[in-house]
Amino acid sequence: MRRGPPAKGHAARKPKSAGGGKAPRRRTGIPEAAPAALPSLAQLRDFLRAAPGRVGKTEIARHFGLSCDQRPALRELLRGLKESGQATPVGRKGLAAPERLPEMAPVEVVGTDPDGDPIARPLQWDRDRGPPPVIFMQREARGQAALAPGERVLARLKFIGGNKYEGRTFKRIARETPARILGVFEEGRIIPTDRRQRADWRVAEVNGARPGDIVLAEPMPTHHSLGPRPARIVEVLGRMGEARSVSLICIHAHGIPDVFPAEAVEQAEAARGVTKRGREDLRDIPLVTIDGEDARDFDDAVWAEPVPEGWRCLVAIADVAHYVTPDSALDREAWARGNSVYFPDRVVPMLPEALSNGWCSLRPNEPRGCLFVEMRFDRAGRKLAHRFGRGIMRSAARLTYEQVQAAREEGTVPEGVPADLLGHLYGAFESLLADRARRGTLELDVPERRVLLDEAGKVQAVVPRSRLDSHRLIEEFMVAANVCAAEELERLSQPCMYRIHDRPSDAKLEGLRQFLESLGLKLPARDRIHPRDFGGILAAVKDKPEDRLVNEAVLRGQSQAEYSPDNIGHFGLALARYAHFTSPIRRYADLLVHRALIAGLALGRNGLVPAEAARFPDTAEHITQTERRAAMAERDAIDRYLAAFMATRVGEVFEARISGVTRFGLFVTVQENGASGIVPLASLPDDRWQLDEAGHAMSGRNTRLTFSLGQTVEVRLSEATPRTGGMVFGLMQGAPRPGGRSGKSAQNSKHNSSGKGARRR
């Protein structure tokens, strides 16, 4: 896959030294003008309207004669322009005068908000204009079916500020025929695996497919619109119900590349080990890798020892840049993939196996090339110094999180590990934790689900993913190394692919504030918000009934982290600068940071090249999108595995929690394993149900039953479809029980949601 065209340039950053001092200003031969006054909002609007295309902060600062010291103030002015809808973001760095949508336009529903109300995007939108506007569709008229994701309508639009509109359906539009259909071949038809696609397809050309096959098909021309449309099967992907069928569906549904070009495979298989030449020899230092039990690629190793002032720590990372060189076949494919994708039954790697599980994996007792950072901390966890280098190392042991945790608790020593190493690692970890607490980072407690499969690929159980101190130890070492990488690149005046996390938007924060106030909890104003404020909220509800609900609401209220060549800091970690350095096997961003360090520190060949640096804005946008694509595919896979697991338990009753309240029913989440599904409105007891949107509750006029967000309920599973991952439940509350007894009545819950109140403000 070819990359997009080079960006117009890479803006130079104002570098700082490791000690915080300013780096010397580059000489241009042109005398600097005296700083001018900041422009007014009206002047900025006029400049954007007159500009022929997108402009960046550098062009704006140059036009108005602003100094580097005025950049923060300019950034706040531009933020205000964007949030008020007077400027539109274009790409990662650009701005342009906003182009308002017409009063009537075709739109496509792309999803729903937490309350199930549809969210749409313009049907025709040029990506060069920036991110598409968000259109919040009004509910359909009484008697009309609700809009579902994938449906298209001609909508009347009303601008409501920022990049947001309200939409009202004027006319429904027949959806265009898809280019390809992914589905299951059954009884002469193709049943789509995407629950949003409601149409079945009649198979006119089977081409060797058998019932139960997962297939790709192409629509065929037809002269009438009655009945299922004809399609031609072009490829059989696998069998529904087989061990790898779920991840196979997700890979193709989300467009994840899973076959390496022959040239990239040949380059990977031709790789060989590194020599000591030009490298620092770390083979006598007993570095160890600590990963999950099922990990196959080990790209980071750690070591620590006490020193008089505190701790000396080493983090060594596989030298992927030695093997994946700029603009090679391996590099082009790694860029296209952006990252590895992890499913319960397989990994779709960013690099071919010869590298990801071979020469770039820090296997025990085998020499490997690495980039390393040596860090020194005082006993309070404050960093005193750091140093980067390119080395050759030999891992002393491959450890698992569970193994390290057990050894710590039992006072034992794993085989191959020096007797005092784990004690030193935990000592440094405790110091780093003290620094983390001092910064006041955001610590959310939202359990992740782990799907356990047997040898045949069937789901054995779905359990919460463990969160041990050994996990946190590695995280703290990696965060420290990532901070050092960002600081070092700034000191070297090298381009950096930052990992940035913005503070919550005004709209999300306002919705979250309203939700928290309903629980008697308060947040400061946006301009004074700090991650520790959220920490105080979470501490106040810990071990209370609303604990999980508040954690999820705070999570939904945050901005998404992303990659950018421009630094705005990392809000969640409470860090002024942060970059990904520690996983170049599975993240392209880390590989770019390695190359920038190699170039800036003159550590040998295969450093960052100018053409690559010029593409940083476009690459940042691309790898942010591939990361989000991977996250959606991984969540999709877990939902489908859960549906397959629950399909054997149809008819059983579960304790669940109401996780969404909409006009067409309730969404519930099973407490036991996190399985989620819908309780259709039609399945509720016969009544006149009224939706309280502000209170996120639904009440029956006659039965006096009330169901509200966060409420604990009993549900019976009535349907589970592994093909789509969908599940349908029925509520036991209010339903007749054997012996004529009615189920326990639903109780009012004080819980609320941060959902829809946030989206239109």
Image (cartoon, rainbow, N blue to C red):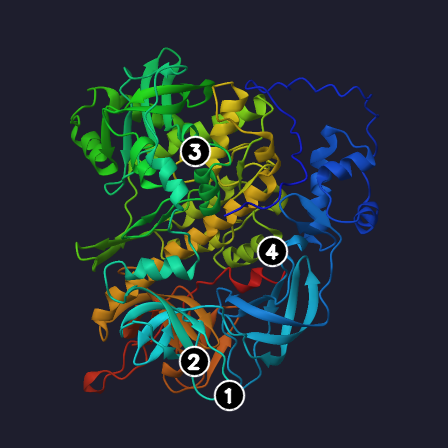
Q: Which residue is mark 2?
A: 230
Q: Nearer the viewer, residue 449 or 94?
A: 94
Give percent across and percent down for residue 193: 37, 69
Residue at image location 64% in from the left, 19% down from the top: 23
Q: Which residue sits at x=64%, y=72%? A: 106
| Image marks 4 and 2: residues in contact by CB distance under 8 Å | no
Q: Please give the name of the residue rendered at 53% of the width and 74% of the height, measured from the top-left corner.
A: 151
Question: Alpha-carbon distance for marks 2 and 1?
Answer: 11 Å
Residue that numbered label 1 is attached to:
224
- What secondary structure is marked by label 4? helix
Name the N-terminal-most of marks 3 and 4.
Answer: 3
Numbered label attached to residue 406: none
> Is disc 4 surrounded by few (<14), some (14 to 19) or many (20+) residues within 10 Å?
some
Q: Nearer the viewer, mark 3 or mark 4?
A: 3
Q: Is residue 737 above or below residue 631?
A: below
First along the sequence among labels 3 and 1: 1
Q: Where does label 3 land, which residue?
A: 324
Quarter of the image for residue 423 reads top left
Q: Is residue 535 visible?
A: no
Question: For residue 745, what is the image quadrant?
Answer: bottom left
Q: Where is residue 416 shown, x and y percent of the image?
A: 18, 23
Q: Secondary structure at mark 1?
A: loop
705 relative to 646 in the view: left or right: right
Callout 3 environment at 10 Å: few (<14), some (14 to 19), or many (20+)? Answer: many
Q: Which numbered mark, 4 or 2, is in the foreground of this view? A: 2
Which disc is residue 507 wearing?
4
Residue 269 appears left or right of 594? left
Q: For mark 2, does the 10 Å Cα neighbourhood hold few (<14), some (14 to 19), or many (20 or more) residues? A: some
